[in-house]
Amino acid sequence: MRKTHTYQPKDINVFKNQLLHWSQQFREVMWLDSNTYTQTHSSYDAVLAVDAFTSIETDYTDAFQKLKEYQLLTNDWVFGYLTYDLKNAIEPLKSDNFDGLAFPDLCFFQPKKIFLFKGSLVEIQYLNMVDDEIETDIQAINKVEEYHLERRVKVVEHPIKIKMRLTKDAYFEKVNNMLAHIHRGDIYEANFCQEFYAEDTKISPLAIYENLNSISKPPFATFLKLDDKYLLSASPERYLKKTGQTVISQPIKGTAKRSKNEDEDLALQNQLFSDEKERSENIMIVDLVRNDLSKTAIKGSVHVSELCKIYSFEQVHQMISTVQSTVPVTMNPVDIIESTFPMGSMTGAPKISAMRIIEALEETKRGLYSGAVGYFTPQGNFDFNVVIRSIVYNESNKYVSFSVGGAITAKSNPLNEYEECLVKAKAMRDVLEE
């Protein structure tokens, strides 16, 4: 049983910062932050889960069945991630590309301590709490020095130079290869990604995350620490959320840079909304998501509540659609995820053909990139993001990586796709090379 306590800090933002720094003492940390971004489908402003009571870690073999058993057995909050390579558990696919990060394919944990932020209040839930443990922790959190939070720390011990896994010419060649598949009719669209990386590098993960989050302020930011493995994410995209019998997916397809000039910025926003190629990309993925959700939905309940709406973030404008379904009360939450994974926005259409071609053309195993991070509640609800605009770090391997990609369709221009990748990579590159 969890003991629950409601706390009202003097300053909610200061307390959030103090809490995140306090959490670094634990081996398992998951911090999810909406950055108070205005959105319709939001349960919490921020969530922290730390200190595993139980956990599951596995490769892709029978991964979803193992997760289902674990989720049912704990019947509690569980937090964790699903890598892109769980596709191999669903379809006869493989992942043989280079992997410098070496993360397990799936990892979830049942935290001893949870902090749920909503408005000016924090709901604190502790598992197997000892006397006065919550009060003692609150005092310790409030003692975290504020000056420590404000100062800019050096995020890398030595200057690092980010390398690109593909040269510009190689990228063009691979995109043209993918276009040949499209013109031949093998696929209509596929998300093609490339890796940026640094070897023999040591960074300060929390400082990197704070800097990345401060320049991006996305609605699905994540700081994840699992021993020596880290995810520092500024994701703007929700993969899948379940509340009661309602399931929503919010795929992103369509990106435009922002301008500091207000009139020019509005023009870029309008241009994205009217862009025929970007809209066709988005609508293709909406159709794919509708099909995925229909596998578990009550007949006739799948509908599109928002189509090609433009949302603006600190770095970019994005075209986002919202697809919704109603599932039976008896539907297991893990089955809903398995039937839609990996997300359409990071694969393509038809999905299986796109994933085969992606695997053949990309140089790097995706791993956690284009997977999902989130949580299940004791009631069987869940909320997961899409791992994009993210830095992944293996401290033991001294390997830092981030990947970016874009949808390739018949109307794609390789140069434009390459430049879009550079726009998406800018925030991660800036915080690593500053």
Image (spheres, rainbow, N blue to C red):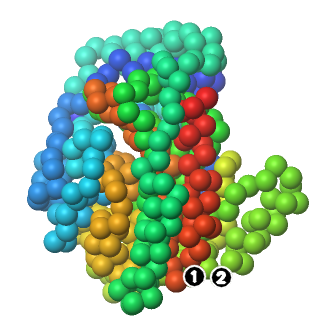
Reading the image, the residue beneath label 2 is 276
Residue at figure coordinates x 46%, y 69% from the top left:
173
| 290 lies above or below 1 | below
Q: What secondary structure is found at the residue carrying circle 2?
A: helix
Name the residue type under label 1: Lys
Residue 122 percent location from the top left of the image: 49, 32
Q: Are marks 2 and 1 in contact (CB under 8 Å)?
A: yes
Residue 216 image-quadrant placement:
top right
Please, is residue 335 above or below residue 130 in the view? below
Quadrant housing the N terminus: top left
Residue pictured at 30% horizontal, 41% vertical: 100
Image vertical order of residue 298 relative to residue 251, above or below: below
Residue 124 lies in what quarter of the image? top left
Q: Residue at x 67, y 67 (%)?
A: 310
Residue 226 lies left or right of residue 173; in this view the side is left
What is the x, y in percent for residue 40? Answer: 58, 60
Res 162 seen here: yes
Above or below for 95 versus 349: above
| Residue 246 left/right relative to 214 | left
Identify the residue at horizontal 53%, vertical 45% (top origin). Answer: 234
Q: Quadrant of residue 421?
A: bottom right
| Residue 222 in view (yes/no) | no
Q: Which numbered circle lies on residue 382? A: none
**How far separated are the C-alphas under marks 2 and 1?**
9 Å
Disc 2: CA contacts within 10 A as few (<14), some (14-19) or many (>=20)? few
